[in-house]
Amino acid sequence: MLPLIAVVADALDDAAPPLNQRLAPYAPAPLVAAVVAAGGLPIVLPRPASEAAAAALAKAYLPHIDGLILPGGPDVDPTYYGEEPLAAIGTTDRLRDAFEIPLIRATLAAGKPLLGICRGLQVACVALGGTLYQDLATQDPDYRLRHAQAAPGTDPTHHVTIAPASRLATLIGTTGFVNSRHHQAVRMLPAGLRAVAHAQDGVIEAVESVADDRFLAVQWHPENMWQAHPEQLKLFKDLVVRAEASR
Ligand code: MN
């Protein structure tokens, strides 16, 4: 049986003609295709209708999934890490946070693996007690690279240095050339996680768990790169391998 890889849905902001669907759940097509290419069976998890329903829904999904992908998306609501929203914060979506945070905790507690992408890295760190820069440009004194690239999303724009003794290095080596579509980043890592890749200005670009292989998250978007840069597909293949091992 192929491992079932759950992808948390975003909600389409605009009504989609001609069906006039509002807040339709969706996942990026290249991400779903990457799961298939990696040998996984993708399913998309719609977010809940209310914050009150979120934790129960996350718990109900858990027995059915073998691995979890947390895709990119809106900024995490900073009240989840004890801060008020600063002027430079972007769009937030409490319903998605309310669903993803218990789903992340439950997935890891059940010994199942996750792959975080961009916001996915950030929300997973927040779920475990970490904090974020709400806006790198106004909060991080060392910030100087363009992390919100204007180049096409399929193009890499900045390099990352990867810790040699890391799972990520075994997949793609000790340097990476990656795309970058974020204005936030991890500020304080929670216990149990470590940074395994940095950009030249010190921004955390990848995080792994210290004691096991359940947690791997990257700040870039491998789903937009894997077709032209096949090393990025290894992140998805690795999630499938970890999902198979956890069954
Ligand atoms: Mn970046």
Image (cartoon, grey):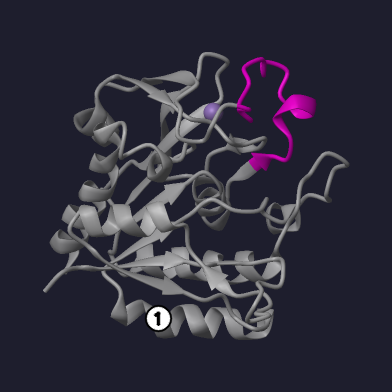
Seen in the picture, residue 238 relative to 240 is either above or below; the reply is above
* Residue 135 part of the magenta-drawn span: yes
Which quadrant does the N terminus fall into? bottom left
Q: Position of residue 222 (x, y in %)?
A: 39, 40
Q: Position of residue 42 (x, y in %)?
A: 31, 67
Q: Quadrant of residue 247?
A: bottom left
Total numbered circles: 1
Left or right: 42 in relation to 84: left
Seen in the picture, residue 95 relative to 159 is either above or below; the reply is below
Which residue is rendered at x = 22% and y = 47% of the image?
Answer: 238
Q: Amino acid at mark 1?
A: Tyr
Residue topped by disc 1:
61
Q: Position of residue 38 (x, y in %)?
A: 21, 53
Q: Which residues are magenta?
A: 132-150
Q: Position of residue 2 (x, y in %)?
A: 15, 69
Seen in the picture, residue 19 relative to 80 is either above or below; the reply is below
Left or right: 201 in relation to 94: left
Which is more toward the observer, 228 or 132? 228
